[in-house]
Amino acid sequence: MGEEFLTLDDFDLKGKSVLVRVDINSPIDPSSGRILNDSRIRSHVETLQDLQESKTVIMAHQSRPGKADFTTLKAHADRLSYLLGRRVGYVDSLFGSKAIEAIKNMSVGDMLILENTRMFSEEIILQNRTLARQSRSHIVRSLAPHLDFFVHDAFAAAHRSQPSLVGFSEVLTTIAGRVMEKELDALGRFLGGVQKPNVAILGGVKADDSIDIARNLLERDVADKVLTTGMVGNLFLIASGVDVGDANLDLARKEIEDYESVLDEARNLLGKFKGNIEVPKDVVVNHHGKRKGMRVEDLPSDQLISDIGLDTIVHFADIIGHSKTAVMNGPAGIFEMPEFSTGTSELLRAMAYSDAYTIIGGGHTVAAAENFNVAAKIDHVSTGGGSLMEYLSGKTLPGIEALKKWKKRSLSSSGKS
């Protein structure tokens, strides 16, 4: 996978002016402006440390207009300064004269973060327009003449096509930062199916996205097994003809967009890949706030399914334990409630203590792994949510396509094929 894009190791960036697009979008306390979790900021430290002999201009977004945590990047600059042990300047301008002047005055070793990209209409209005049009945006036209390279390190936003993410790739040599490099290498290892058996554990409430992932992994013969939990597991139970009860059926219809077509797709996948898709053998319902285990054959229930049962946990953990590579996206139940966290915690522990190469992604899954103190034992913790799901679904991600394009340009200019 690493052969498909250029990295920081392919260039001598000492003394160069480098624009780095990061994704440091963080949970913020609206009342105080305090950053509540800096994990995304910490993820980019290695990239920025590798650019300490460059003039490094950092570009990022925080939330979106209208939300309570939509704010400037001043606190992010302060946090980066602390994490890097060096001053990271902040300017409350993105492409205006104030930003340009600050860039012109930079010395080698300086780092500067520009204003929240989403405070400027072009970032929103030009989304999904052609790359040529985005490269003619004021953001790109104003900044590009003062820069030598564009480092794309925002894997978590790589599924978006916006000027700050792909516009510069039309006019500046575009290379992957360390976060992007690690993400693509790890996912390439999984999707390449080099080490089998290959297992995907799909849970959470985003059943429509998980259906796309399951289809892609099974049709490409990437995954030998797809283990379904959470709302995804409930959907496949319904698709297999199980009456889960009106309360659970109503919840599925509410949570799953375009429910009927997604259900039809689940039925199709079960028919085509029945031996490859595992549905829960038993479930746990919320019985007045307490766990109540039920075999699938004993359904329906008028109580909400809130976790997978012990037999399913043991069965799925055994499959994970015998796998060579495994990816998990989405919790197995309502893990935020201790009473219904067992499925999620035990599957994560099975991942953590297996000999497989393991990947987890999605905000809830990563949060659960941190809560259960197993994140450090996972081989790769993805920074992506939507981008991870789209990548596993086989969809084209604009940010990644831009990186591949520059690799091809590099090969072409060097006379290699």
Image: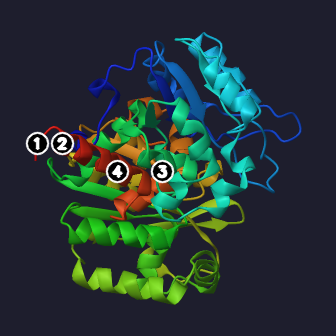
**Which kind of residue does numbered mark 3 sit on?**
Val
**Residue marked by disc 4:** 327
* CA gap, disc 1 and disc 2: 5 Å
Return the disc, 1 or 2, that comes first in the chain's sequence: 2
Return the disc, 1 or 4, that comes first in the chain's sequence: 4
User: Left or right: 125 with respect to 370?
Assistant: right
Percent x, y of residue 99: 70, 31
**Residue marked by disc 3:** 166
Return the disc, 4 or 3, that comes first in the chain's sequence: 3
- Residue 181 against residue 317 in the figure, above or below: above
Discs 1/3, front: 1
Tell whether label 3 touches label 1 (CB within 8 Å). Answer: no
**Which kind of residue does numbered mark 1 sit on?**
Lys
Tell whether label 2 touches label 1 (CB within 8 Å). Answer: yes
Return the disc, 2 or 3, that comes first in the chain's sequence: 3
Q: Residues within 10 Å of mark 2 (few under 14, many from 20)?
A: few
* CA gap, disc 2 and disc 3: 20 Å
